[in-house]
Image: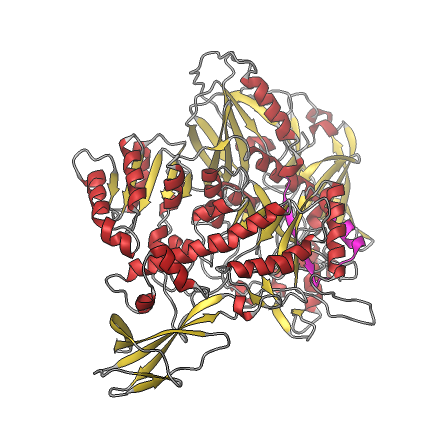
């Protein structure tokens, strides 16, 4: 007989006892504190529940539908919403009575008022995007307050020309300066430039010159960018994020108006979505601000912002970039936070992209947020989480599941978990799903949807297991908020190097967001930093058994270096004040590791002249001299080994298991480790944890069950694909009797009962019952080929007395998942819904239960099946003789969607404006038809438990 261990044993531990502590007497013992923590883990507080971005299309919503959707969310384990009003999906129709109303209209405010009050009544958090679409902007933004850019035009001039015509200025453009420059093989040479006189009568006089030359014209212009995905009445220019007057005008016209919808219960937070102010690198008073902040006039140096780098190019570009950051901080983030505080709410913001915000910009908002699922790379979630760790913010939210398993309606519960675990590993402890589309009852199934998102509402047939998925996410979020993040390694971001690589763009060339970076023309700090760091540094730190936070020079200057290890990744520029603090940190026992190159100079034109020699001196004394405290690595490939030498690993896995990630939280009385397998294969390894404890517990965030184990110096770990667990270590002092894993076996082999035949299947949405002699996919039958919905499988299960013994557990087992190839190169998704041509996050595992099921025995709910191992313990529910087994299974909504597509020669979803112009097109191919629901032979499998009663942890505990 094949014995599959019980659910909990797929993360099992064989503990080698290593007692190292004495009894400690406290007013409240660690065991009591652990008991409190354990109770909260089983039933975590509501504020740890996931939230959903709630798209209101049009806007066109009704109070009845708003209330229904809020109640549905709560029933599914969702704890709140973030309302984002966006583009319409239907046109006004006098025949049907369908009507879109304008953004900020009385109807819109009435809907917000009702939804907010209903959410408060239901105990749901209510956040509000302070606008429509993104970035902030709209019809109240005049061109004079619209996003600015430095427009650079190049006009070739023939040898001997005495003047040149000034190019036509775009609307709102202001002439700044013109320069005569040489050219070599068509490239601009900015080493020797001559500023020209201001224009007269539309022309500028030229001095005598020889050889190929051109004139550079610099004008203060506007990007012309419009708000992306706006609602009706919200169309217009994106505002200037460097101009305080622009944000104040916006807050008065839009923010104050929106707040009229809220009485004594303002939103929990207002939200600023992705900045994405493409190419915005200037504002009307930039030269004045630059002079005041940097101490010199930028005007003569404007040509250094383009062309080939010269001797002082990077220092001037650094000063330009730093000034942009300061203006965005002071004129965008700070006024927004102050406004939120004045209105009794908080400011939640995604602080990356353009304008070029830095890591420490996150300190200027109440609730920094990130996005992105690459847990081993540079991600905005780790960016936000690191800032929160540094500046004392306990909650890091993440925009979660964007583009999950495209095209839309392909995402599964396992996809949700696999992606969420990646966000947890990056530091998130508040998931905000992307998202929940408002969908009227009149909409054909599977309802409305947002173009760039998965859908997580009841239109998914697998919604029946959503409460179980949500409870897993809630429990994990709760534990990841306890204590403080235990992170050993701080990675110093090359912020000054990023500023130094900013580049203005000449009209007619690549846009200001074109890559690759560096050098490129990006004016996003985090994008350039990610390119400078490369793909290996973060990965090496994590795979060496440590966790990592980002830190920047501003944070070091303000709060120091609260980490035992600091890594300097190939830095060129470093402020002298920061470097002196790093030197003091190293001489007082902190480990400093420099990779690739040592800092060469101070950043900025003036500071480089005055401080660079001292920067070089510190580099020499810190890393080059005999007995120097720092560690210099010429090759970044040596980083992992060096880290292991300077500090004991937090988690050591042997053999190495690079797909296992961890988060360590430190409490005064305990250490908590969240571990997750991010691979589609089983992983077996031995782990050692850097703790000293006489007690250890294993907690299952899926079921909420816990198990006491021995304190460990060696831990054998075995994970199913995409499985996770919690380890809790603490001191109790007096060692109590613990559950030990045994190798006991039943006296005789026992055979599993095959359940693959003779089922009665009722398709709930069709009102149709069929007899299935042999289980097969619904897509094999013409009548159910495109069926999306639930079906009820029923059969009698005769259980022999021989299986009902105290030392035998019985599992309804659906078989293993099937790994599928992981897409690592550009895929064909560009032909579907994403339009990106790049792979998206998903669980690379085909489930034997497509996609979620509830198990009943004699009409008693046993549990849910939606993730590996695909089994549920039914021991306590069975009796000798006949038992009525019922399985309610839900598949994917995409099959129903493809039914409609199959009826059309050109399946096309168009999101339209009132003028009937398509805003975007989403193509879905019939090749995505998904087989459902059982792809394996279910069976009742007897299994002798490897530890004694009480029952092993399982979904029904």
- Does the stretch in magenta take in 61? yes
Name the one closer to the observer, 926 or 355. 355
Residue 798 spot, x, y in % from top left: 76, 33
Quadrant, the C terminus: top right
- Does the stretch in magenta take in 486? no
Which residue reaches farthest left? Answer: 626
Name the one closer to the observer, 309 or 299. 299
- Side of 676 relative to 765 (left or right): left
Colouring of the image: secondary structure
Name the one closer to the observer, 446 or 501. 501
Please state the total of marks drawn on the protein image. Answer: 0
Residue 189 spot, x, y in % from top left: 26, 72
Residue at 47 percent across and 39 percent down: it is 391
Vertical order, 582 against 239 (above or below): above
- Side of 317 relative to 474 (left or right): left
Residue at 58 percent across and 37 percent down: it is 477
Residue at 37 percent across and 47 percent down: it is 493
Do we see residue 919 in this rendering? yes
Which stretch appears magenta?
49-71
- Side of 569 relative to 447 (left or right): left
The quadrant holding residue 754 is: top right
Residue 505 spot, x, y in % from top left: 39, 69
The quadrant holding residue 757 is: top right
Quadrant, the N terminus: top right
Residue 364 spot, x, y in % from top left: 50, 46
- Side of 416 relative to 766 (left or right): left
Do we see residue 414 in this rendering? no
């Amino acid at each position: 007989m094949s014995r599959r261990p019980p659910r909990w044993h797929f993360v099992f531990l064989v503990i080698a006892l290593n007692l190292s502590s004495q009894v400690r007497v406290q007013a409240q013992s660690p065991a009591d504190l652990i008991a409190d923590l354990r109770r909260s883990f089983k039933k975590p507080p509501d504020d740890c529940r996931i939230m959903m971005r709630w798209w209101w299309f049009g806007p066109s919503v009704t109070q009845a539908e708003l209330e229904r959707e809020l109640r549905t969310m709560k029933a599914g384990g969702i704890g709140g919403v973030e309302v984002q009003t966006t583009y319409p999906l239907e046109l006004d129709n006098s025949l049907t009575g369908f009507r879109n109303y304008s953004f900020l209209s009385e109807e819109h405010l009435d809907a917000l008022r009702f939804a907010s009050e209903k959410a408060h009544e239901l105990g749901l958090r209510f956040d509000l995007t302070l606008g429509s679409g993104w970035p902030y902007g709209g019809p109240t933004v005049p061109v004079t307050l619209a996003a600015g850019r430095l427009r650079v035009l190049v006009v070739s001039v023939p040898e001997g020309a005495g003047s040149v015509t000034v190019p036509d200025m775009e609307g709102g453009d202001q002439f700044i300066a013109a320069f005569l420059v040489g050219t070599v093989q068509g490239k601009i040479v900015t080493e020797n430039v001559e500023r020209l006189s201001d224009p007269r009568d539309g022309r500028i006089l030229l001095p005598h010159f020889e050889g190929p030359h051109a004139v550079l014209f610099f004008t203060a212009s506007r990007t012309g960018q419009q708000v992306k995905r706006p609602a009706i009445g919200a169309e217009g220019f994106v505002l200037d994020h460097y101009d305080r007057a622009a944000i104040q005008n916006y807050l008065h016209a839009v923010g104050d108006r929106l707040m009229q919808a809220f009485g004594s219960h303002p939103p929990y937070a207002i939200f600023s979505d992705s900045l994405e102010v493409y190419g915005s690198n200037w504002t009307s008073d930039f030269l004045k601000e630059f002079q005041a902040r940097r101490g010199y006039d930028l005007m003569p140096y404007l040509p250094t912002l383009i062309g080939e780098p010269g001797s002082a190019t990077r220092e001037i570009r650094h000063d330009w970039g730093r000034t942009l950051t300061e203006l965005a901080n002071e004129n965008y983030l700070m006024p927004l936070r102050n406004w939120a505080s004045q209105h009794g709410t908080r400011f939640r913001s995604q602080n990356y992209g353009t304008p070029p915000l830095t890591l420490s910009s996150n300190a200027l908002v109440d609730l920094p947020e990130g996005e992105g699922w690459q847990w081993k790379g540079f991600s905005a979630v780790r960016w936000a989480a690191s800032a929160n760790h540094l500046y004392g913010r306990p909650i890091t939210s993440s925009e979660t599941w964007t583009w999950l398993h495209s095209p839309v309606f392909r995402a599964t519960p396992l996809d949700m978990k696999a992606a969420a675990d990646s966000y947890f590993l990056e530091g998130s402890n508040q998931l905000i799903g992307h998202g929940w589309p408002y969908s009227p009852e009149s909409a054909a199934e599977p309802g409305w949807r947002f173009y760039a998102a998965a859908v997580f509402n009841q239109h998914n047939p697998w919604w029946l297991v959503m409460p179980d998925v949500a409870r897993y996410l809630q429990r994990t979020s709760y534990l990841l908020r306890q204590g403080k993040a235990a992170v050993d390694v701080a990675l110093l971001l090359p912020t000054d190097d990023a500023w130094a690589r900013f580049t203005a763009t000449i009209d007619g060339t690549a846009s200001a967001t074109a890559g690759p970076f560096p050098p490129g023309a990006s004016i996003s700090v985090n994008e350039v930093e990610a390119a400078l760091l490369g793909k290996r540094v973060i990965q090496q730190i994590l795979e060496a058994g440590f966790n990592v936070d980002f830190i920047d020079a501003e944070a070091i200057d303000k709060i120091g270096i609260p980490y035992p290890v600091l890594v300097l990744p190939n830095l060129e520029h470093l402020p002298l004040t920061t470097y002196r603090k790093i030197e003091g940190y190293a001489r007082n026992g902190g480990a400093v590791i420099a990779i690739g190159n040592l800092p060469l100079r101070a950043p900025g034109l003036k500071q480089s002249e005055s401080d660079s020699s001292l920067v070089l001196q510190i580099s020499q004394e810190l890393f080059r001299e005999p007995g120097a405290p720092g560690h210099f690595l010429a090759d970044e490939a040596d980083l992992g080994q060096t880290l292991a030498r300077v500090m004991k690993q937090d988690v050591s896995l042997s053999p190495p298991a690079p797909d296992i990630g961890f988060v360590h939280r430190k409490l005064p009385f305990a250490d908590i480790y969240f571990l997750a397998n991010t691979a589609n294969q089983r992983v077996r390894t031995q782990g050692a944890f850097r703790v000293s404890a006489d007690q250890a517990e294993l907690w299952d965030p899926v079921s909420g069950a816990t198990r006491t184990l021995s304190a460990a110096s060696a831990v054998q770990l075995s994970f199913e694909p995409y499985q996770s667990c919690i380890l809790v270590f603490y001191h109790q002092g007096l060692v109590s009797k613990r559950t030990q894993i045994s190798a006991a076996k039943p006296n005789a082999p026992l055979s599993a009962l095959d359940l693959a035949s003779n089922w009665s299947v009722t398709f709930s949405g069709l009102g149709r019952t069929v007899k299935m002699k042999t289980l097969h996919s619904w897509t094999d039958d013409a009548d159910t080929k495109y069926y999306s919905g639930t079906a009820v499988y029923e059969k009698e299960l005769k259980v022999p007395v021989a299986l009902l013994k105290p030392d035998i557990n019985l599992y309804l087992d659906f078989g293993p998942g099937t790994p599928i190839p992981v897409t690592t190169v550009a895929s064909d998704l560009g032909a579907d819904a994403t339009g990106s041509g790049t792979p998206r996050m998903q669980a690379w595992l085909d489930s034997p239960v497509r996609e979620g099921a509830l198990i009943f025995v004699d009409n008693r709910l046993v549990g849910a099946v939606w993730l590996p191992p695909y089994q549920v313990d039914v021991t306590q529910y069975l009796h000798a003789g006949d038992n009525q087994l019922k399985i309610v299974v839900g598949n994917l909504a995409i099959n129903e969607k493809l039914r409609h597509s199959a009826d059309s020669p050109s399946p096309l979803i168009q999101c339209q404006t009132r003028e009937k112009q398509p805003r975007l097109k989403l193509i879905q191919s019939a090749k995505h038809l998904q087989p459902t629901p059982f792809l394996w032979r279910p069976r009742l499998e007897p299994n002798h438990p490897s530890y004694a009663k009480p029952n092993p942890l399982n979904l029904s505990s």
